[in-house]
Amino acid sequence: MEPTLLDTIIDSVAAVFMIVGALMSLAAGIGMMRFPDLMSRMHAATKPQVFGLFLLLSALALELRSWNVVPVLILAWLLQLLTAPVSAHMVGRAGYRTKHMKKETLLVDELDAVVARAEGQGGDDPVC
Amino acid sequence: MMTIVLWITGSILVAAAALAIVRIARGPSILERVLATDVLLVIIAAGLTIEMAVNKHTDNLIFVVLCCMIGFIGSVTVARYVTDRRNA
């Protein structure tokens, strides 16, 4: 079957989405190397990945041109969208408690007073 | 055209995976390693998605979903049980 103009346009959009989505993963990798501490690396690890995966799944939907796969793609992306903040929050919490961070890069440390009060009351579980 | 896209995205993803693996090797803490492993898992999912888009099939869709699940469970589990040994 001869590819129509519409096919060519959809293919081009999907190609652009794929390249930008791969660049988002590269941005996450570069951020892992260049940022100074755990708290800033957390940003680089989560945000571009969610957007990049969205672009790649959109490209897949465009290439397949079928409505049957769209619910599964939405499920995969929603799963990533819901789990990335939760895991980043848990990692950040544990990182704060174990002091894997540079306090001097922070402008405001709103958690400091809360943690000090909890430790003063003899909190037996320092992580949660 | 799709072959060129495959080559470009493939090289970008290999570079990103190499950077994530260097971060896994260097550390300095287990939390950074688990974070870099999460990044690496999403890069693998991205590679599977691109391969499916170029070859127009849906065989690996379940692995893409599983990659997200495993990354989440892994980082939450590690973060839950990391404690400060210097104070304990």
Image (cartoon, grey):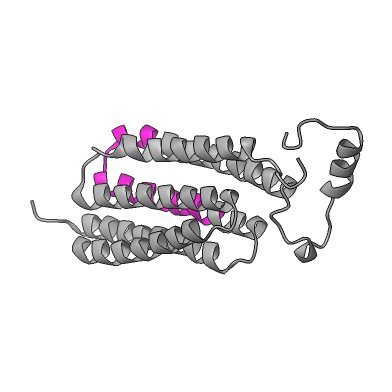
- Measuring 73% from the left and 47% from the top, which residue is drawn there? B86
In the image, taking residue A74 as reference, residue A89 lies left or right, namely right
Quadrant of the image occupied by residue A22:
bottom left
Q: Where is residue B57 in the image (x, y as percent from the top left)?
A: 21, 42
Magenta part mainly helix, strand or loop? helix
Is-magenta flag for residue A68? yes
Residue that extends furthest to the top in the rendered view of this protein: A124
Query: Quick one: quadrant of the C terminus of chain A?
Result: top right
The residue range painted magenta reads A47-72
A5 over A121 or under it: above or below: below
Q: Where is residue A47 in the image (x, y as percent from the top left)?
A: 56, 53
Q: Can residue B32 be seen in this view?
A: yes
Q: Where is residue B56 in the image (x, y as percent from the top left)?
A: 21, 46
B86 over B10 or under it: above or below: above
Quadrant of the image occupied by residue B69:
top left
Q: Is residue A74 visible?
A: no
- Measuring 59% from the left and 49% from the top, which residue is drawn there? B31
Q: Where is residue A20 in the image (x, y as percent from the top left)?
A: 41, 62
Between A4 and A98, which is closer to the camera in this rendering? A98
- Measuring 73% from the left and 49% from the top, which residue is drawn there? A96
